[in-house]
Amino acid sequence: MNGVFANSLPGTATNFTVVAGSGRDICVRGLIANCWSDLVCCNNTGTPPGIGSINCDPNEPNSEVVVVWTPPIVYDTVEISLNGTVVQTISGTASPFVTVTGVAGIREICVTGIIGGVATTPACCTVEIPNFIRGDTNHDGGVDIADAIRALQELFSGVPSLGCPDANDANDDGGVDIGDAIGILQFLFSSGSIPMPFPNCGPDPTSDGLGPCTHAACP
């Protein structure tokens, strides 16, 4: 294959499966009475089989995702991309898992095998790690008196949430209640503090059960 010996078969064999990328010359010749026949060659123009199953396991506090896949063959290399940008390239013989760091928001992670210079069809998964500003209940990118008012309105006046309970959890106690509005007011007027992520967008450094988060000020 491309001038490199790949396998030897009995003279009665009539077929052999070779996994190769596009552009590889595959040649066959026979041997009888210590005499070689002429080479008969073809060029493989097919696309190699793609990555099998893929699993993405987010770790919210560390803003990372563990990606595991099942390769059907041994590739030359494997590329891992985040939202279309290659972030890691590993050997095709390496263990089929990586940790992708710096993930926040809704992101697509894809794994692509490369063999013979040809890329397989990527296998992808979509993950969501909340990306928000704590205390920014009205999603305007900052924390001020309007956020305390919004928090109280959502609790007591039927105003709907904007879709990120983590942002409303201003004191980071894992729940949304009047204590969060008080925490915002203490920050504004009594030298209180707001836990991370604040004052900029970021992932939640603590685990909780508050559910999905989409924050308009944090892509």
Image (spheres, helix red, strand yellow):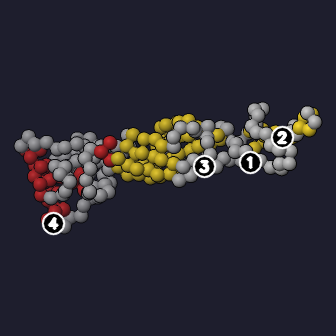
Q: Secondary structure at mark 2?
A: strand
Q: Give the mark, 3 or 4, whose residue is nearer the N terminus.
A: 3
Identify the residue under disc 3. 72
* C-alpha span from label 2 to label 3: 25 Å
27 left or right, relative to 200: right
Q: Give the mark, 2 or 4, whose residue is nearer the N terminus.
A: 2
Q: Secondary structure at mark 1?
A: loop
* C-alpha span from label 2 to label 4: 79 Å
Q: Residue at x 61, y 37 (%)?
A: 76
Q: Nearer the viewer, residue 194 or 159?
A: 194
Residue 140 position, x and y percent, is: 25, 49
Q: Secondary structure at mark 3?
A: loop
State the count of labels.
Answer: 4
- Closer mark to the observer between disc 3 and disc 4: 3
Query: Does 3 appear above or below 127?
Result: above
Identify the residue under disc 1. 17
Mark carried by residue 158: none
